Each structure stands twice: as structure tokens, then as C-alpha cells.
């Protein structure tokens, strides 16, 4: 399956979520790769410092929007899980990512400013749906921190965009910053809370993928 991690807003966690999902899928035994579409090539650099003894994750840089579809299709022949790490630039690339993915995960920070910044992404999403009508997309709340009822209101506000919000949240934790430095995911860290929230998220995505007919979990 091909999972696009995208949002035109910068710094919402596209790269962090891509890498951490890749680590979980690879650790579960899925043959996994990341397609890094951002010109800063953060995921490519991350794979460069990743210890060889850890679960194998191939990272491929793909900054040419026109070639993305083919790159993703070719990789999908060899990899069960292809994760596309998105770019924040207002470019053709985002439309290509949307069209190349079986499902989209849209990380969003729980702030009013971030909701307002969603509009350009939605314009791209609606445009892309003229070419392919069925592109399942889910919001993922990143950098969540428990501080009152404000989040219930925010979940409802995000829901108003008409897309489902995943039940799993990713909390704000030092483990995400620390593990990124040496090519790991939190699944490979000593932070059990971080680890279990990523496992929950991966399982929720797998369940969606199975319901959409994208993957058969029992065979993996
Ligand atoms: N759940 C989290 N807890 C703590 N820090 C986080 C979390 N998610 C992301 N970060 C940090 O926030 C910053 C931005 O995250 P990241 O680079 O993943 O976002 P991005 O959407 O890929 O950014 P860009 O648009 O520049 O590609 C990074 O420093 C990252 O370590
Ligand atoms: Mg990034």
C-alpha cells in the first residue's frame, strides 16, 4: 500500500510521522520504504545515519514531481508499504503525492492557526479528486498535549473539513526529536509511552488499509 503523509503546512510532523510509521511497519515485518519528496531530504539524511542492525528501511529521494508516480509504482512492486514523506512547498508535488497514494495521512498541529492554513491543501485535494474520486484521507493530530477541553473542540473543528480524524494522537515528546537524530524511530527507543502510541497508530492505519482492501494482514 502507498501512504502519502502530506499537508502544505510546514513543520506539522510529516517527516517525523513518515519515519516513525516506517519503523513500526518494518518492525512488524512489512517490507517498507520511504519516498522523500522534500528538497531538504530529511528522510534521506535520516536513513544515512540509521544503524545497519535495525529493521531495514529503504529511503529514496524523489524531488521531480513528474516522475513521482512512476517512482512510487516501481517501488510498490518490491515494497509492501511505500510511505511518501510530503513537502510543504506549494507545488505540483502535493497534487502528485495525493494522486500516487492509496490513502493520505494529514498531520495537523492542534492550533487554530494550523486549521486556517489547511485551505491551500484542500484546494489541491479537491482538484486531485477530479482525476481520482476515491482518495481516503485522515487527519492525525500531532504534538498533542493534554491541557483541557480545548482539544475536544478542536477535534470537532477539524471534523468540519469533512474528513475523519484518526483516534490515535501523537503526543509532544522528546523521544521524537531525539530518535530522529540518529536514524531511529520511537519504537526503537526506551520511551514506552511513545512506543505504544506509535504501535496504536500503525494498527489503526493497518485496520483502515485492510478495510479498504489495500493489504491483507494475515498474509504478512
Ligand atoms: N510529536 C512530536 N513531539 C515532539 N517534537 C515533534 C513531534 N513531531 C514533530 N516534532 C518536531 O517538530 C519539528 C517539525 O517536524 P517535522 O520535520 O517532522 O515536520 P515536517 O512537516 O516534515 O516539516 P517540513 O514541512 O519542514 O518538512 C521537528 O523538529 C520535529 O522533531
Ligand atoms: Mg519534512
Image (tube, rainbow, N blue to C red):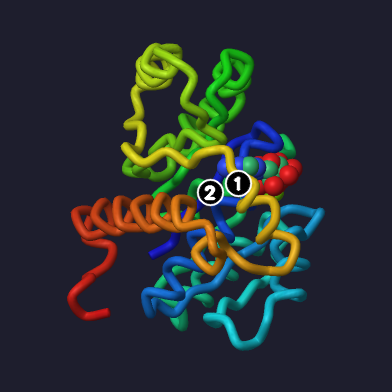
Disc 2 residue lies near ligand 1 with CB under 8 A:
no
Q: Position of residue 3 (x, y in %)?
A: 45, 56
Q: Position of residue 170 (x, y in %)?
A: 48, 41
* Residue 204 shows in this picture: yes
How crowded pointer 1 is (Cα within 10 Å; few <14, some 14-19, many 20+) is rated as many
Q: Which residue occupies 49% across, 52% down?
A: 194
Residue appearing at x 50%, y 46% in the figure: 98
For this rendering, which residue is in front, 203 or 115? 203
Residue to which mark 1 is pinned: 14
Q: Is residue 100 above or below residue 156?
A: below
Tell me: residue 142, above or below residue 60: above
Q: Position of residue 185 (x, y in %)?
A: 57, 63
Camera-side residue of 72 and 15: 15
Q: Is mark 1 within 8 Å of ligand 1?
A: yes
Q: Which residue is mark 2?
A: 5
- Left or right of 143: which side holds 136? left
Other-residue count near label 2 (Cα within 10 Å), few / some / many at <14 / 14–19 / ≥20: many
Q: Is residue 72 left or right of residue 89?
A: left
Q: Residue at x 72, y 66 (%)?
A: 46
Please state the horizontal and vertical placement of residue 66, each as a whole percent of the image.
67, 57
Q: Are marks 2 and 1 in contact (CB under 8 Å)?
A: yes
Query: Which residue appears farthest toward the bottom when viewing the image?
Result: 53
Secondary element at image label 1: helix
Closer to the camera in the image, 146 or 160: 146
Residue 94 visible from this viewpoint: no
Amino acid at each position: 500500500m502507498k501512504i502519502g503523509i502530506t499537508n502544505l503546512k510546514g513543520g506539522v510532523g510529516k517527516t517525523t510521522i513518515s519515519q516513525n510509521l516506517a519503523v513500526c511497519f518494518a518492525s512488524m515485518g512489512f517490507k517498507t520504504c520511504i519516498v522523500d519528496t522534500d528538497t531538504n531530504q530529511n528522510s534521506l539524511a535520516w536513513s544515512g545515519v540509521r544503524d545497519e542492525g535495525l529493521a531495514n528501511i529503504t529511503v529514496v529521494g524523489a524531488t521531480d514531481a513528474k516522475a513521482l508516480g512512476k517512482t512510487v509504482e516501481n517501488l510498490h512492486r518490491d515494497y509492501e508499504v511505500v510511505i511518501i514523506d510530503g513537502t510543504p512547498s506549494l507545488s505540483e508535488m502535493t497534487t502528485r503525492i495525493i494522486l500516487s497514494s492509496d490513502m493520505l495521512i494529514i498531520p495537523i498541529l492542534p492550533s487554530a492557526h494550523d486549521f486556517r492554513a489547511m485551505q491551500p491543501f484542500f484546494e489541491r485535494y479537491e482538484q486531485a479528486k477530479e482525476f481520482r474520486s476515491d482518495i481516503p484521507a485522515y487527519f492525525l493530530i500531532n504534538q498533542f498535549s493534554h491541557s483541557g477541553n480545548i482539544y475536544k473542540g478542536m477535534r470537532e473543528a477539524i471534523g468540519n473539513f469533512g474528513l475523519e480524524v484518526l483516534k490515535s494522537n501523537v503526543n509532544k515528546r522528546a523521544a521524537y526529536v531525539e530518535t530522529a537524530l540518529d536514524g531511529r524511530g520511537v519504537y526503537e527507543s526506551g520511551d514506552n509511552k511513545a512506543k505504544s502510541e506509535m504501535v496504536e497508530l500503525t494498527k489503526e492505519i493497518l485496520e483502515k488499509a485492510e478495510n479498504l482492501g489495500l493489504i491483507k494482514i494475515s498474509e504478512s
